[in-house]
Structures are given as structure tokens and as C-alpha cells.
């Protein structure tokens, strides 16, 4: 590999434009060399903003002599075909979450990259946040003791325009409204990040799930409210409550509960209660652990992937990890559809 990993962007919509491209350009060991979107004006504005050539053809990216890796930032249902196409062209792949809409699609992506000898990683970037890193350090140090509960709670009020234009309205499309094209609603679009980072922090794996979901307020095929319960391999219980139609705005309440304390995730800090001594916190009372004002998890994700390519090592978040995160979501959807408990791993 050359000194900086040369990246082609496939899909120049909302996430690529406002987040991933900025992270690539700011990284120490990667750079973007071309951007591609099927909509000409979207590709053009992306190229002008980031000062790179642009195109409307995927083949222009995959045949580019300098491109060593691609970022796939396209609608969820396109993750599989684009990943397989990139792998066959010999390009390493960073794919935005979720890995795919179905586990079968994910399996084909993993197999294609393995067979082609290229790396596949899924951008579950909350693993790289300062909050996540500190929480993992505390859990590993025994601050909360044996984990008995995980809580995931997001109440969002997505505007009607979100479903056809995201939050920025940069690209007009209807894929978010389709179960087949998106894979689902608030659970796969939002909560998958939190569920994945708690897997990473705790090392726990879910063994069964029970869920109910519905579409109450939104003219879509996907859920706008979901409640789920997970049982984990150490006996802990996880609870999920999430909505994209909660009038009044956004509220978060993710929490790790253990036999000796709790970790509560808030916007710019962690609140930690512990009974343990000698771990840098005051035992027997709530501690506030502030986080940096500026945090760049996506940039760290890009840099760590470039390091993996350079050293010919597996990335931190390979396709298999993206599949495990998706499996938690699929298990909840199957449970809600059948109104029954679902065992994990799924058969």
C-alpha cells in the first residue's frame, strides 16, 4: 500500500457528505481520490466540496488505478451488490451500517471479500467514541461488577421529510420507507449502533429475544416504535425502547447495570456509580466523567482501517462483527412478526 490509503466514495448522499468524507480528508493515513453518485448534481457538488474528481459510474471508481479501497455509502439494499462488485475488482471495502438488510446478504458480502482476499469492515463507529472507550475501561476494571442489565432507550421525532430526504434533504429518495430496501426502521437505522457498542464494551452475546413493534404515526412500511427484551449469555437482561415518532424531540438513556454499580451514557459525559475502590472514582456515590468537547470516532475508524490494510491485518470491525450486530436486529424483527421468543444465533 502507498503511504496513504487511496479511497473512492460510492454514494455521495447525506452521511458521505457531512461525515465520512470529512473524516477521510482529516485522517493521517487516508485520502479520497474520487467520488461517485448516480445523481449527477449530487456527485458534482460532492466533488466540488471535497476537491476530487466525480462520476456517476461505479465502474469509474472500481477501475481507477489509484483506488485501493472504497466506502460504500449507498442505500442499505445496495450494500451487498456494491460490496461484491468492489471485492471482485480487488478493492478493500468500508461499508456504512447496517452491513445489509438481511443476514443472507451479509453472508454473501463476507464470502465475496474473503474469496477475493480483500478486507471488509462495517462503520459501527461508536466503538471509537471517547464514551465507549472509557466505559469499556471501567467495565474491564470491574467498576460495575457482574453485569446484570443493559438498557437502550432512544425517543426521536423524525420529521416527515426525513423519509424522503434524510435530515439534510440532500438526496430525494424513498428507500427509507421500504422494509425491503432499508431492512427496517428505528431499530436498524439507529439503535444498532448502541447495541453493537454494548456488545463491544461488555463482551456479552444475546441468546434470545422477544419484541413487539408497529408503525403508528408514519406513512412507511417500517416500524416507528419498538420494544424488545434480550437475554445474554451471562444471564443479564437487555431492554430496548425506541421510537422515531416520539413527539417532543430526542431523549437518550443508555445504561449498563451491574452488581456493584451503573454506567449511564449522557450526551457529553458518563455518570458512574460504583462500590469499588481503587479504580479512580469515588466509591458509594455518583461520579461525573466528562468527555472531550471534540471527538472524532469516524476519523479513528478510517485511520484504523487504513492501518489494517497497511499491515495486512483484519480490521477492528470486520464484516462478521457487522453481521452479529444485524443478527440482534433481525431476531427482534422475527420475534415481533411471530409474537414469540426467538433463539440467537438464528437458524
Image: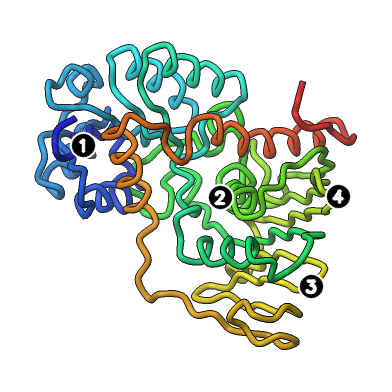
Instruction: Locate residue 89: give its quadrant.
Output: top left
**Residue wearing tag 1:** 5
Name the residue nearer the viewer: 170 or 233: 233
Mark seen at residue 243: none
Dot 1 falls on a residue whose secondary structure is strand
**Label 4 crowding class (10 Å Cα cut-off): few <14, some 14-19, many 20+?**
some
Please tell me which residue is depicted at 64% across the width and 36% down the height of the picture.
Answer: 221
Q: Earlier in the sequence, mark 3 or mark 4?
A: 4
- Select label 4 or label 2 by which is in front: 4
Please tell me which residue is depicted at 66% across the width and 72% down the height of the picture.
Answer: 264
Q: Where is residue 224 in the image (x, y as percent from the top left)?
A: 67, 49
Dot 4 falls on a residue whose secondary structure is loop
Q: What is the spatial separation of the Cα atoms under label 4 and label 2, in whole angstroms?
A: 22 Å
- Select label 1 or label 3 by which is in front: 3
Q: Earlier in the sequence, mark 4 or mark 1?
A: 1
Q: Do the residues labelled 2 and 3 touch (CB within 8 Å)?
A: no
Q: Which of marks 4 and 2 is nearer the N terminus?
A: 2
**Label 2 crowding class (10 Å Cα cut-off): few <14, some 14-19, many 20+?**
some
**Residue wearing tag 2:** 193
Q: What is the spatial separation of the Cα atoms under label 4 and label 1, in whole angstroms?
A: 43 Å
**Residue wearing tag 4:** 235
Please tell me which residue is depicted at 65% across the width and 77% down the height of the picture.
Answer: 272
Q: Position of residue 47 (x, y in %)?
A: 14, 41
- Select label 2 or label 1 by which is in front: 1
Q: Which of marks 2 and 3 is nearer the N terminus?
A: 2
**Label 1 crowding class (10 Å Cα cut-off): few <14, some 14-19, many 20+?**
many
309 in relation to 191, above or below: above
**Residue wearing tag 3:** 260
Identify the image's colour scheme: rainbow, by chain, secondary structure or one colour. Answer: rainbow
Amino acid at each position: 500500500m502507498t503511504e496513504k490509503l487511496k479511497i473512492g466514495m460510492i454514494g455521495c448522499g447525506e452521511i458521505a457528505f457531512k461525515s465520512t468524507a470529512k473524516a477521510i480528508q482529516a485522517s493521517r493515513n487516508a485520502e479520497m481520490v474520487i467520488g461517485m453518485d448516480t445523481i449527477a448534481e449530487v456527485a458534482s457538488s460532492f466533488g466540488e466540496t471535497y476537491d476530487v474528481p466525480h462520476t456517476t459510474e461505479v465502474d469509474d471508481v472500481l477501475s481507477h488505478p489509484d483506488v485501493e479501497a472504497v466506502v460504500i455509502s449507498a442505500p442499505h439494499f445496495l450494500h451487498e451488490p456494491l460490496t461484491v462488485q468492489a471485492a471482485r475488482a480487488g478493492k478493500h471495502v468500508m461499508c456504512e451500517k447496517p452491513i445489509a438488510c438481511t443476514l443472507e446478504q451479509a453472508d454473501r458480502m463476507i464470502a465475496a471479500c474473503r474469496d477475493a482476499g480483500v478486507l471488509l469492515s462495517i462503520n459501527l463507529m461508536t466503538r471509537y467514541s471517547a464514551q465507549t472507550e472509557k466505559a469499556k475501561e471501567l467495565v474491564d476494571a470491574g467498576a460495575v461488577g457482574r453485569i446484570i442489565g443493559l438498557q437502550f432507550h432512544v425517543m426521536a421525532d423524525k420529521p416527515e421529510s426525513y423519509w424522503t430526504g434524510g435530515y439534510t434533504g440532500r438526496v430525494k429518495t424513498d428507500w427509507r420507507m421500504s422494509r425491503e430496501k432499508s431492512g427496517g426502521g428505528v431499530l436498524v437505522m439507529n439503535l444498532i449502533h448502541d447495541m453493537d457498542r454494548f456488545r463491544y464494551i461488555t463482551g456479552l452475546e444475546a441468546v434470545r429475544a422477544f419484541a413487539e413493534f408497529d408503525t403508528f404515526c408514519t406513512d412507511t412500511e417500517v416500524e416507528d416504535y419498538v420494544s424488545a427484551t434480550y437475554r445474554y449469555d451471562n444471564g443479564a437482561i437487555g431492554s430496548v425502547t425506541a421510537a422515531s415518532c416520539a413527539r417532543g424531540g430526542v431523549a437518550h438513556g443508555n445504561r449498563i447495570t451491574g452488581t456493584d454499580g451503573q454506567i449511564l451514557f449522557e450526551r457529553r459525559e458518563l455518570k458512574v456509580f460504583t462500590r469499588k475502590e481503587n479504580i479512580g472514582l469515588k466509591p458509594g456515590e455518583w461520579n461525573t466523567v466528562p468527555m472531550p468537547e471534540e471527538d472524532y470516532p469516524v476519523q479513528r475508524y478510517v485511520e484504523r482501517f487504513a492501518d489494517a490494510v497497511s499491515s495486512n491485518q483484519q480490521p477492528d470491525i470486520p464484516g462478521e462483527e457487522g453481521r452479529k450486530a444485524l443478527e440482534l436486529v433481525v431476531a427482534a424483527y422475527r420475534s415481533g412478526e411471530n409474537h414469540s421468543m426467538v433463539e440467537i444465533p438464528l437458524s
